[in-house]
Amino acid sequence: MSIAKTIRERRSIKKGYKPDPVPEELVLELLNDAVYAPNHGLREPWRFLFVSTESKQSFIEAMLRVYPADQHEKRRALFSEPSAFLIVIMKEDPRQKQWEEDFAATSTLIQNFQLLAWERDLGVVWKTNPHIWDPATHKILGVQPGEKIVGFLHLGFFDKAEAPKAAPRTPAEQKFSRFQ
């Protein structure tokens, strides 16, 4: 499959995951390619926390503690949908320029991961729900001071025939100008 075709066809898969477990070996294989994302000074500001299919229930129970009791069932349903999770954590550089470069690099790594996963019929959606900023979530997940959760990647195998249709994109020409 061409890179352009993969970029245009990739979709965020939010539901409809198969019950198949997501092998840790596959996640590591994809990450070992995704880490070739451009990153200034090869700082590689990221680290990863994998929640396997087998560990998902204890993860859900821990994450429910972040939410008020009246939201537990809704959150349980949302966290139960994917087969596994990959939490991407970034070291926060106190210098603004380096922080922005590191955030861009980590975002690029996530996009690489999503494209690679798409080729393997592994669905991914990158979530930035409010709990990623909650100190209680940080404590549960072992996120240290000076680190930021860039996102929860929800993972699961899916049927590409049932993937969402592409939303229209604005042609680049409409957002393009020339310096004169």
Image (cartoon, rainbow, N blue to C red):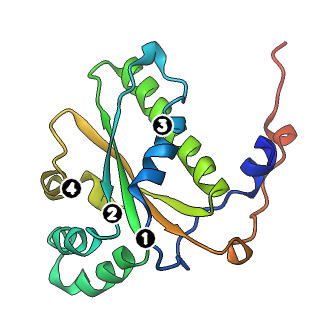
Q: Of helix, strand and loop, which one carries label 3?
A: helix
On the image, numbered disc 1 is attached to which residue? 21
Foreground disc of the pair 4, 1? 1
**Mark 2 Cα shell of 10 Å, populated few (<14), some (14-19), many (≥20):** some
In this view, the residue in front, 107 or 54, is: 54
Label of residue 134 in the image: 4
Q: Which residue is mark 2?
A: 52
What is the CA distance from the residue labelled 2 to the residue labelled 1? Answer: 8 Å
Which image quarter: residue 9? Answer: bottom right
What amino acid is labelled 4 in the image? Asp
Check if mark 3's residue and mark 4's residue have beta carbons within 8 Å.
Answer: no
Q: How many C-alpha atoms fall within 10 Å of the one at disc 1: few (<14), some, or many (≥20)?
A: some
| Residue type indicated by callout 1 | Pro
Q: Residue at x 82, y 27 (%)?
A: 177
What x and y, as percent, mark residue 107? 49, 39
Asked if residue 85 is positioned above or below residue 87 in the image, the reply reads below
Are the two marked residues, 2 and 1, in contact with CB atoms closer than 8 angstroms? yes
> Which is more N-terminal, label 1 or label 3?
1
- Quadrant of residue 37 within the rendered picture: top right
